[in-house]
Amino acid sequence: MTSGFDEFSLALFTTLAPAGTIAFIALALARLLERDHEAAVRIDRLAALPFSVVLVGFIASATHLGTPANALHVFSGVGRSPLSNEVLAAVAFLFLAGSYWMAAFKQHFPDSVAKPWLVLACAAGAALVACTSLAYAVDTVPTWNTWYTPANLWFSALLAGPVIGLLFLHLARAGRRRYGAVLVAVSIAALAAGTIVLALHQQSLAGVANNELAASALVPGYGTAIVFHALAGAAGCICAALSLRSRRSPQAALALSGAGTLLLLTAVLVTRVEFYQLHLTVGF
């Protein structure tokens, strides 16, 4: 099993990085669909916010490498190591997203350059979430090496990410109300599907054990965490939906979407902590 600090740092990474990536994609799609030049510029200026969310998660994940020197060896396994693939995808996304934000401050930044750049950044972001979801396919850890693991991570990202994106769109005073409704709908669907997958994962633990203990004994509070996930997630989605009805009051819209963001990130973080407590190897 891992230490409590490692569990929390990794849980923080897999909460913030995928959600921040999806938030960036939500902003990018709004930018690609935006016809108002001034609104598009405001979205570009705020591209640093989801980038920062991903970066904070990435920094948190670096703590479990032991020493900074170990980070250099991560790239040696690209193509054969899930961790190396994950780090490479993260670097590619951070480079494309960060450089786009800096380039967007140029006085003349034509759409013919901006839009393909955004598409590439979105593709790198999708690759990052995919690689992160597959990084735990370890044969010797049967509690992680299941289809529930990538499904849970994707649903978590799609739960919190769209609402974070909605918060940033409120800050930018951009994005159509209909687009905001689509973002909230994605979060609601991800909450429903993700809660079902979490419950199925909990049930599957009954038949998993090694020579020392059963997997279910590692997470006695898993059921409570799933209930909290569902309730906090529902409250967060409600706040996000109400923010769309407050567009005439920017302060109220920001407060509601901000509250929704905090609730959803907390809902995800609680289940991610439980996931890392499930580290159970074959044998001893």
Image (cartoon, rainbow, N blue to C red):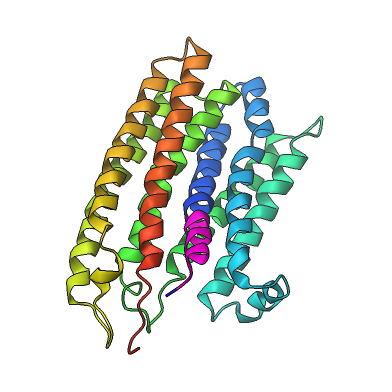
The answer to whether residue 136 is left or right of residue 224 is: right
Give the vertical position of 68 relative to 49 (above or below).
below
Q: Nearer the viewer, residue 218 or 140?
A: 218
Res 208 quadrant in image: bottom left
Q: Residue furthest top?
A: 248
In this picture, residue 57 sits left or right of residue 70: left
Where is residue 277 shown, x and y percent of the image?
38, 66
Across and down, in percent, residue 225 comes to 29, 51
| The N terminus lies in quadrant | bottom left
Q: Does 167 lie within the magenta span?
A: no
Q: Residue furthest right?
A: 107
Which residue is pictured at 45% across the width and 36% down the height?
Answer: 262
Q: Is residue 29 above or below residue 181?
A: below
Q: Is residue 188 visible?
A: yes
Picture quarter with the C terminus: bottom left
Residue drawn where x is 25% and y is 51% of the image: 224
Q: 50 or 68, which lies in front?
A: 68
Answer above or below: position of 48 versus 9: above
Judged left or right of residue 8, residue 87 is right
**Within the image, what quadrant is residue 235 found in?**
top left
Instruction: Read off the magenta span.
Output: 2-14
- The image position of residue 264, as x and y in percent, is 40, 40
Residue visible at 36% across and 82% down in the picture: 281
5 falls in the magenta region = yes
Number of numbered markers: 0
Q: Nearer the viewer, residue 270 or 125?
A: 270
Picture residue at 47% right of the left edge, 70% below the top:
135
* Secondary structure character of the magenta stretch overall: helix
Q: Quadrant of residue 28?
A: top right
